[in-house]
């Protein structure tokens, strides 16, 4: 889980602020012209706002991965819709879809580790109905809290 969390923190830490400076790439080319026309602040202004949102998403993933990972997944789906409106960026949209699956995996793992750390480890079918029956990870061993 830590590898996913670090990945979803490191990449936006680099890409988010770069939306303001364009040192790595001209991010404006990834904005669909149809969306840029709808924005009152223009394409570059919108990309700057997107960079600010990505920085907030980084903070959520870093400190509240269970919530932040879902925010990142939904954010990536918005990016995918934008990219599908631009010819020749379908490969980037597919890559972002894979990243969104990784974000969903991070959210699910964060939730599972939270249950484990609280001692609420139950079978998947019991998650919503009964939490009084426990399943030991290794039978006969005392359960310890996992580090995340």
Image: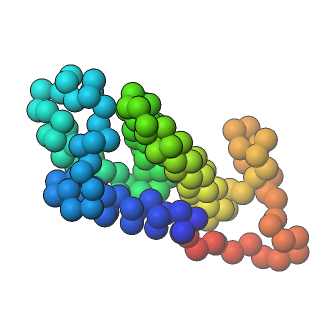
Position of 86 relative to 132 (above/below) = above
Identify the image quadrant of residue 89. top left
Q: Nearer the viewer, residue 119 or 103?
A: 103
Where residue 115 appears, as percent x and y from the top left, is 63, 57
Q: Residue at x 54, y 68 (%)?
A: 3
Q: Quadrant of the C terminus?
A: bottom right
- Does 65 sit left or right of 125 as displayed? left
Name the outermost residue toward the left.
41
Where residue 19 appears, as percent x and y from the top left, is 22, 52
Q: Nearer the viewer, residue 60 or 123?
A: 60
Residue 141 in view: yes
Q: Residue at x 19, y 24 (%)?
A: 37
Q: Residue at x 16, y 41 (%)?
A: 44
Where residue 30 appears, as percent x and y from the top left, is 32, 41
Residue 74 in view: no
Q: Nearer the viewer, residue 17 or 62?
A: 17
Q: Quadrant of the N terminus?
A: bottom right
Name the outermost residue toward the right.
140
Q: Residue at x 27, y 42 (%)?
A: 29
Disc tally is: 0
Identify the image quadrant of residue 136. bottom right
Q: Nearer the viewer, residue 26 or 43?
A: 26
Where residue 90 appears, as percent x and y from the top left, is 48, 37
């Amino acid at each position: 889980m830590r590898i996913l969390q670090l990945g979803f923190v490191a990449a936006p830490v680099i890409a988010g602020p770069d939306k303001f400076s364009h040192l790595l790439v001209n991010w404006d080319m990834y904005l669909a012209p149809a969306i840029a026309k709808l924005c009152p602040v223009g394409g570059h202004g919108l990309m700057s706002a997107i960079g600010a949102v990505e920085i907030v998403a980084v903070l959520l993933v870093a400190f509240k991965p269970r919530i932040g990972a879902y925010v990142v997944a939904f954010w990536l789906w918005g990016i995918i819709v934008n990219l599908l409106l631009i010819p020749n960026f379908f490969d980037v949209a597919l890559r972002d879809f894979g990243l969104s699956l990784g974000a969903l995996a991070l959210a699910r793992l964060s939730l599972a580790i939270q249950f484990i750390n609280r001692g609420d480890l139950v079978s998947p079918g019991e998650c919503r109905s009964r939490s009084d029956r426990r399943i030991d990870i290794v039978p006969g061993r005392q359960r310890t809290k996992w580090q995340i």
